[in-house]
Amino acid sequence: MHTTRVALVTGSGRGLGRAIAIELARRGLAVVVNSSRNPEQAGRTAELIRAAGGQAEAVVADVSSPADVARLFEAIDRTFGRLDVLVNNAGINRDVDFREMSDRQWFDVLATNLSGPFLCSRAAVPLMDRAGGGSIVNITARTAYRPRKRGANYCAAKAGLSMLCQCMALELAPSIRVNCVAPGTTDTAEVRERFDLDTPDGMARMLAPIPLGRIATPEEVARFVAYVALDAGFMTGQDVLYDGGRNLT
Ligand SMILES: NC(=O)c1ccc[n+]([C@@H]2O[C@H](COP(=O)([O-])OP(=O)(O)OC[C@H]3O[C@@H](n4cnc5c(N)ncnc54)[C@H](OP(=O)(O)O)[C@@H]3O)[C@@H](O)[C@H]2O)c1
């Protein structure tokens, strides 16, 4: 078995997942980077980690596919023989009015954002048991508790993930801790495009309800996720907002 601790960050080819992968590598873990459609992005995250002196392997796998998840965990088992940290970060949005939501838009979002964390967490348990314990962090969103228009699929998936987290925390204690981090709006290309943040009006609309007056950087969210994953040893089954106070307004 590998002596260094090992982390898997799903959906770490870009955005928040990439920042989390880099931060966990900076904290000394070997990191398995993953994405489903863009191998070059996952490869780039792995390269950035290696260039900084860390250890990383990129595996292309769709977390919503049981066969892909089985292949992903076989690769982790073969290369490292253990897993210490799993960050269920991969997520997609297919925002659309409820009346027009297609079967595909519903099932795709549920499959990636909710079934993906289930499949990956279940596969992670034996490898974490072998490592003597582990920590799972699920990336949710305030939409787990607050509805928003055009997001019934996304909100329902994140709400489900929040309860999945609590059930896993109960069943997997004491050896595996399971928590959720719900970041506020974080500066990723996906969010910039979806909310028009490159226009002054779009950014002003976004900032108006955030008491701290800015959106988060992926790096600061990543440091918090690493804290929950590695340092918060007495915390399990929790859902933590990291949102600049957005929940207050
Ligand atoms: N950014 C925010 O403001 C914000 C706020 C709250 C919560 N979140 C949550 O944070 C997470 C990351 O968001 P982000 O803004 O960084 O998104 P992003 O920039 O779109 O990145 C998503 C990553 O997930 C991968 N991915 C998508 N579907 C996948 C699948 N089925 N299997 C494996 N990988 C998959 C993508 O790569 P491929 O396309 O190659 O698969 C990509 O690497 C999501 O769960 C999101 O809901 C984000």
Image (cartoon, rainbow, N blue to C red):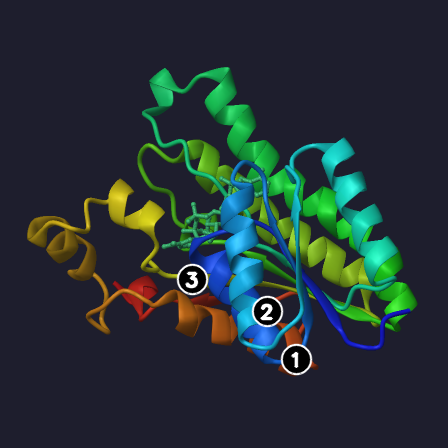
Furthest-left residue in view?
A: 200
Question: How far from the left and from the top, in percent, is residue 123?
Answer: 81, 49
Give the distance between the C-alpha atoms of the residues marked 3 and 1, in whole angstroms.
Answer: 23 Å
In the depicted view, which residue is nearer to us: 59 or 166? Answer: 59
* Residue at mark 3: 183
Q: Which residue is drawn at 76% across and 68% down?
A: 84
Q: Which of marks 3 and 1 is nearer the N terminus?
A: 1
Q: Earlier in the sequence, mark 2 or mark 1?
A: 1
State left or right for residue 230 relative to residue 150. right
Question: How far from the left and from the top, in percent, is residue 24?
Answer: 60, 72
Q: Is residue 237 visible?
A: yes
- Quarter occupied by residue 63: top right
Q: Residues within 10 Å of mark 3 (few under 14, many from 20)?
A: many
* Residue at mark 2: 50
Q: What residue type is labelled 1?
A: Gly
Residue 28 numbered tag: 1
Quadrant where the N terminus is found in the figure: bottom right
In the depicted view, which residue is nearer to us: 188 or 132? Answer: 188
State left or right for residue 116 relative to residue 22. right
Badge 3 residue CB within 8 Å of ligand 1:
yes
Give the distance between the C-alpha atoms of the residues marked 2 and 3, in whole angstroms.
Answer: 27 Å
Give the distance between the C-alpha atoms of the residues marked 2 and 1, in whole angstroms.
Answer: 12 Å
Helix, strand, or loop for circle 2?
Answer: helix
Q: Nearer the viewer, mark 2 or mark 3?
A: 2
- Quarter occupied by residue 118: top right
Q: Which amino acid does label 2 sit on?
A: Arg
